[in-house]
Amino acid sequence: MAKLERLRAGENGPEKRANFSSMVGVILATAGSAVGLGNVWRFPYMAGQNGGAVFILIYLACVLLLGMPCMISEFIIGRHGQANTARAFRTMAEGRPWALIGYMGVLTGFLITGYYAVVAGWCLQYVWASLIGQMHGEPTFYQQYFTEFSSDPVKPIFWTVIILGITYLIIEHGVRDGIEKASKLLMPALFILLLIIVGASCLLPGAEKGIEFLFKPDFSAINSDVFLAALGQAFYSLSIAMGCICTYASYFSRQTNLTKSAVQIGVIDSIVAILAGLMIFPAAFSVGVNPDSGPSLIFITLPNVFQQAFAQVPAVGYLIALLFFLLLSLAALTSLISLHEVSTAFFHEELSITRKRAALIVTVSTSIVGIFCSLSLGAVGHSLEFFGRTLFDWFDFVTGQIFLPVVGFLTCIFIGWFVPHKIVRDEFTNWGTLRGRHFHLFLFLVKYVCPVCILFIFLHQFGLI
């Protein structure tokens, strides 16, 4: 009991545990964890493939009914444990096998950090290529450029190490001086860039067709695939089950309103996703590009779109493309910071080593993972290919399609069915200082709705339903 009280008081051994200095820091840092390539890259092409406006409506409902309860559940575990994700689960599970969920979350975050850094490095390469004037040519140029660059044995690795190095420099400075300060700088910059590109895109001739595609729902497009795609995107976009939310919540104070924070983060995350659609689809419709271009939308389709859309004023097209890839890099970095912190906090606390040393271990080890993932896409890919998938694809598949839904499902079952409701209520209501009017709704969603939805996502992606 004494140990639990020390944890609740925010102590970590003999030292007071770090926490965010302000509510703004809490929201921007945690929103930065959620806002990333999942919003700016994955959301637009998912919306394009699943009916546009009708997909957005279902997605928003999924964020509310699935994302918010899952996020609050991770908040409760993280703040209650006042420790890294593995130890937080272990504290709440009191030594029972449920503690393994925390270790699985840390492992998921670590693996995602490695291959996510490769994609983040691609974004930096495109910023550099735009700065030196390489990003121009015929439509076929962009396909060839991306294929040659991503399969190069050196360049992608260079940028992967660079982006992880930048992340290390932020993480080593701690919660307030590193993560919080960076989030207060990066998130506003991301919003400003996003609004600039949205404005330019929406002023193009024919842009109204793209706006209509995003905001005028065609309900005839609704089917089970659209529902399940929206569920999966909500889960992916909010960074649930990666250890990020739980780790950041361990830096929350006792006064942080968990429900209000989850709603604010969900709103910011959804706004960024919709603005990303407004950034991309008006420009795409303006030049007659199909909105369901898929994962290649960012690195192959969009450079060509910007070039065609601003053909009369090439300098503007160049500037918009540069700002777009800078935006992608910032989005990737905010997510990478939170992913890196999951493993850094784990090594720092479990091995009782300094934060700087823990961050260095994570940076070096994830760089090695990233190097092999990158090489698997290049000339030595055949040596790093197993059962028809490259190493990069395996990391993406195992973490995104197995670990994330499994960790999310087990977290909901754990909070809803096994953790004493008094503990959950105490955290939910800040030990009775908040009214907690929606507690029973939250508990119902976590016990019944979220596990069922996550199970449907899991089974659907394997073609079992």
Image: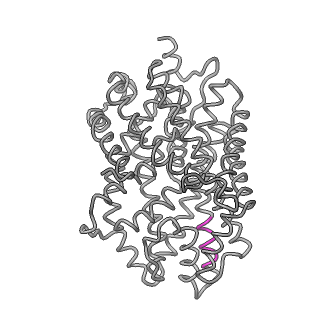
Pick the front one: 2 or 192:
2
Pick the front one: 196 or 13:
13
Q: Residue farthest to the left?
A: 220
- Magenta-drawn segment: 317-325
Up-down: is 138 above or below 439?
below
Residue at the image position 31 percent from the left and 64 percent from the top: 54
Magenta part, dominant SS = helix
Up-down: is 10 above or below 59?
above
Residue 271 position within the rendered picture, expressed as x and y whole percent measured from the top left: 43, 58
Q: Is residue 162 left or right of residue 139?
A: right
Residue 156 position within the rendered picture, expressed as x and y whole percent measured from the top left: 70, 59
- Does the segment drawn in magenta span residue 318? yes
Up-down: is 303 above or below 414?
below
Residue at the image position 51 percent from the left and 62 percent from the top: 41
Q: Is residue 403 left or right of residue 11?
A: left
Residue at the image position 57 percent from the left and 36 percent from the top: 21
